[in-house]
Amino acid sequence: MPWWRVLLAPLLDVFRPRAAARCLVGASRPAFVAVMVLSLVAIAVTVVGLTLWADTITGEWGWRPPAQVWQNWHERAIDGWLGPLEVAFLLMLVLGPCLPAFLAWLNLPLVYGTGSAWRSYKQSFRAATGLLWPLALAVLVCGSTAVVQEHAFYGVPPGALAAQPEFTPLLVSSVSALLLVLWLVRATRALAPGAPDPVPPPRCEGCGYDLTHQPAERRCSECGLDIDASLVAAGSRPGSRWAAEKAARAWWQTTVGVLFRPRQFYRRLQLRTPAAADCGFAMWSYVAIGLCAALWAAAMIVVISMQGNPPPREAWLVIPFAGTAVVIIGTLGCWFGHRLMGALVASVWLAGRALPDFRWAAKVIEYESAFLWVFCAFWGALLSSLAIVGAIVGGPWLSMLLGRSALFAFLPAEAQVLLLGTLGLVGVWAWRYWVAYRAIRWSNF
Ligand SMILES: [Zn+2]
């Protein structure tokens, strides 16, 4: 592969993330560093160029040529050279690698199986660095939209503003963020870990005793559990419904099973099967959450309208844009929270070398996406009640009910309930991971 092809791999393979990730993982170290520096410079140049373009029109100055904007920026610079722009440029180059470093950690549970975790992290880092080129493209598209929007804003007389699709930059940004996340998810699939070598020995499901040599009485010599309960898959670990059948009904039954009977669900899950057997569950959870959020938002608009506060006529042009953007951002927030929690838990397990094969952690994280529904139900119920009960009692009912507590006097009661409730649910989630860990750690299937 020619050197320039490696440098531009994530850009040329922008629609083939897996190929880009494989290219970066296989590249020599100098070539990889060059890709990273070049894509960071591309992002910085794009940001600087967009800022230059944006400043060519301002409300007070009217249009001025880019050269003059450039000159004006440097009038306040140190020695006329190191202006705020150059400092921003340098900061971006220094802080830029933090983004792939963080994303690589976020993806580590999906790319690490057995062996050296540091080696898996480095591969994950290379794949995540591939995101920088598509990010430069996204910055260009979103920034251009915002600048065009801003310049159009200056060209319109003040009275005619309401009809402008002001949420276009927001919509473009949220769609770009969605595409970037999809790019990263697909790129990470190129690094799926292989089966462990050597295969870990069979264990007693009750106590973890090594069952390589089976006792003659067919009972575990440590805890007395019937060894068939550990070594016969049909009885002990039949697998999840979703692994058996990729259908809407199986997805729903699996979601209910994970949510309400986590111990039983993870006790029956097959962990040593290929990751492909369980993949797709979380993806469908995100899609379903996004659809439900859109339906909920529409229902809320109808309810608020029926209470006699319909949005103004001009807003109907904006609502579809803004609503789609907010639903996308909310769904991406769910994805991020899910993966963040998964990476935290997997890091704790990794530090304690708690599992014989860390592909099992990826499976637990996949199914724990079902718990996102609890967060969504909590937030949805809180926001709905604020809108509906608030309209009936004529104010923020939680603040009226609770008053201002001494705990966080600077926060209104609604924000406190939202914050503490969310933290409480995070605690429940951590407990669920503990339950899952206890149910899978000695799996033989
Ligand atoms: Zn035992």
Image: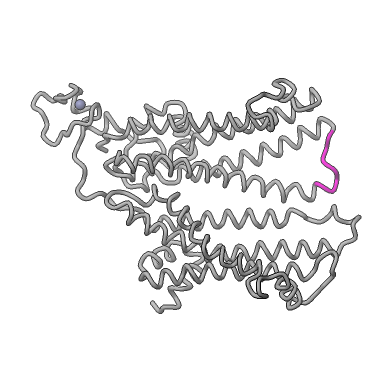
Residue 1 forms part of the magenta stretch: no
Q: Nearer the viewer, residue 30 or 166?
A: 30
- Ligand 1 placement by image quarter: top left
Residue 361 appears left or right of 140: left
Residue 418 appears left or right of 75: left
Residue ID at (71%, 63%): 145
Q: Main secondary structure of the magenta part?
A: loop
| Figure quadrant of residue 123 | bottom left
What x and y, as percent, mark residue 63? 82, 72
Q: What are the residue bounds of the magenta stretch? A: 309-315
The N terminus: image quadrant: bottom left
Above or below 361: residue 141 = below
Residue ID at (70%, 57%): 169
Residue ID at (38%, 27%): 263
Residue ID at (43%, 44%): 343
Q: Nearer the viewer, residue 74 or 326?
A: 74
Can you name the residue that lies furthest to the left here? 216
